[in-house]
Amino acid sequence: MSIKGKAYVAGIFEHPLRDIPDRSTAQVHAECAKGALEDAGLSFDDVDAYFCAGDAPGFGALSMADYMGLKLKHTDSTETGGSSYIVHAGHAAEAIAAGKCQVALITLAGRPNGSRVGLGDAATRGERFRMAPPGGGGGGINEVPEAGFENIWGGTTHNTYGMCAMRHMYEYGTTSEQLAWIKVAASHHAQWNEHAMLREVVTVEEVLASPMIADPLHRMDCCVISDGGGAVIMTTPEIAKSLKRPLVKVIGHGEAPKGPRGGKNLDLTYSGAVWSGPPAWAEAGITPADIKYASIYDSFTITVLMQIEDLGFCKKGDGGKFVADGNLISGVGKLPFNTDGGGLCNNHPTNRGGITKIIEAVRQARGEAHPKVQVPNCDLVIAHGTGGSLGTRHGAGTLIMERE
Amino acid sequence: MSDVSERPATRRIPAPGQNLESKPFWDAAKEGRFLIKRCNACGEPHWYPRTMCPFCHSTDTSWLESKGEGEIYTFSVMRRNTPVPYAIGYVTLDEGVSLLTNFVDCDLDRLRIGQRVKLKWTPTGDGNPPVFTFTTA
């Protein structure tokens, strides 16, 4: 397949101003977006893919996507400096050609001249405090649109995921015992991994007795902090078949960001997996019942529970019952998960667990997991993760793979 | 012995970063007025405040003074790696939008989802605007 003739440039807009002393950088991105959509005769509601580079304030594409109220199937924040947008246009054409999206928005905006003007003494204070506290506090200028309203509250991964767990318990009666079963299952797997940070098998009681970090999450509800890393090679069917390794192919993929969405109908009990899952299942032509092994991002136990529900392994709200009683333990339960011990016991390299999720899923599909945790006839596997925070804004990615 | 007495009673909340879009909010905060944004085209309020409505994408949006009353949507008390426990959470305002905040001047162990809360400005010092914390009503 080629991108040749598969994607058209339908709308363009160049901002008319050369000095913009009176608005935020996010605002200028949105004005450019609006201009290009109007030029095309399309609306923000038509956009299902968003591309931006380092000039977009915030965390990758997530802040601006949420700012503009976009509902997306595809995001890309590839950064190659000034050439980024040309790279983006190529990536957008690839995504459109592959049927991953239909209307891609690419924006660039910045205000090197105007960013100091108009804030009065706040700008001066900004200079003074610029290097002071991390996370957007300390006054001064911050072009990340949500920063002043959100980054001052001492939000950490622990307490923002804690807020999700608290609400999930309130709405669905999920219990700390049920969450603890997720850690217990991970520890059963980690005992066989010689590289795992935590190899000791733990009990539900031990999880509940570990110190409370951020209500209602105990220390053992949290993943480890580790150095480390990983890498993945992807290639063509022809080259894969010429190599002396088991054949594991990608058969489905989906992605989606989720944020507070203007603060309307806030719902922290579900994740972006509700949108990244369905296109992946449809592309793969299978259902959750077909999956033999699941790598599920486990920054916290609640992360696993919500994503299992959102991917359709059980009904929304039934995650607590689903994960209890060893249902995630390989050889014991219906859905063997994170057989390397996952983030909860094995590792979480530089606080980013996505790549290790792919790696263990491929090991399982190849039949190369530890014999004590290898799932028999493991021909269909899934690797799923969320990044950012489930409690504020995050991006979800779903990857379904098949062993030939 | 001394570490207990030297602990601050509450977490110090840093001053908010501002930009030209959020400046009117923080200027009003200095005057004790709590503003949200509402879209004149579709009528929906939104949070955090933007020039463009995140729902209908109209740029015809206005500032609206909120009473700063609502209920706790969710919360979490941070108990470790902090000099003093503090509560982060979302409040759903009576106007219908939910916002992230801290709960202050109340018993953190008695916070409950659904509890009524009201705005309580917390100063950040050094000429910076106060921030919109909430306390139990």
Image (cartoon, rainbow, N blue to C red):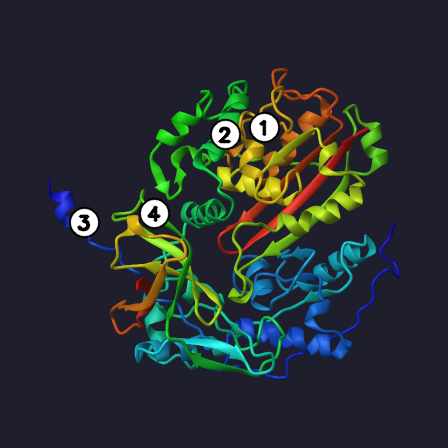
User: Label 3's element?
Assistant: loop
Q: Are marks 2 and 3 on the same chain?
A: no
Task: Say how many tags the image has.
Answer: 4
User: Label 2's element?
Assistant: helix
Q: Are marks 4 and 1 on the same chain?
A: no
Q: Which mark is residue A138?
A: none
Q: Which chain is indicated by disc 3?
A: B
Residue A337 vs A54, above or below: the answer is above
Q: Amino acid at mark 1?
A: Leu
Rendered-image quadrant of the C terminus of chain A: top right
Q: Which mark is residue A328?
A: 1
Residue A219: x %, y % from top left = 39, 35
Classify 10 Å Cα crowding around label 4: few (below 14), some (14-19), many (20 and above). many
Question: Would you say residue A113 is visible in this rendering?
Answer: no
The CA distance from mark 4 to mark 1 is 29 Å
User: Label 4's element?
Assistant: strand
Side of A157 relative to A75 (left or right): left
In the rendered image, which quarter is residue A133 located in?
bottom left
Q: Which residue is mark 3?
A: B7
Q: Which chain is indicated by disc 4?
A: B
Q: Amino acid at mark 2?
A: Trp
Could you tell me if the residues under marks 4 and 1 are in contact, i.e. CB atoms within 8 Å? no
Q: Which residue is mark 2?
A: A181
Q: Are marks 3 and 4 on the same chain?
A: yes
Q: Residue at x 15, y 44 (%)?
A: B4
Residue A245: x %, y % from top left = 76, 24
Question: Would you say residue A165 is visible in this rendering?
Answer: yes
Name which of mark 2 and mark 1 comes first in the sequence: 2
Q: Which residue is mark 4?
A: B78
Could you tell me if the residues under marks 3 and 4 are in contact, i.e. CB atoms within 8 Å? no
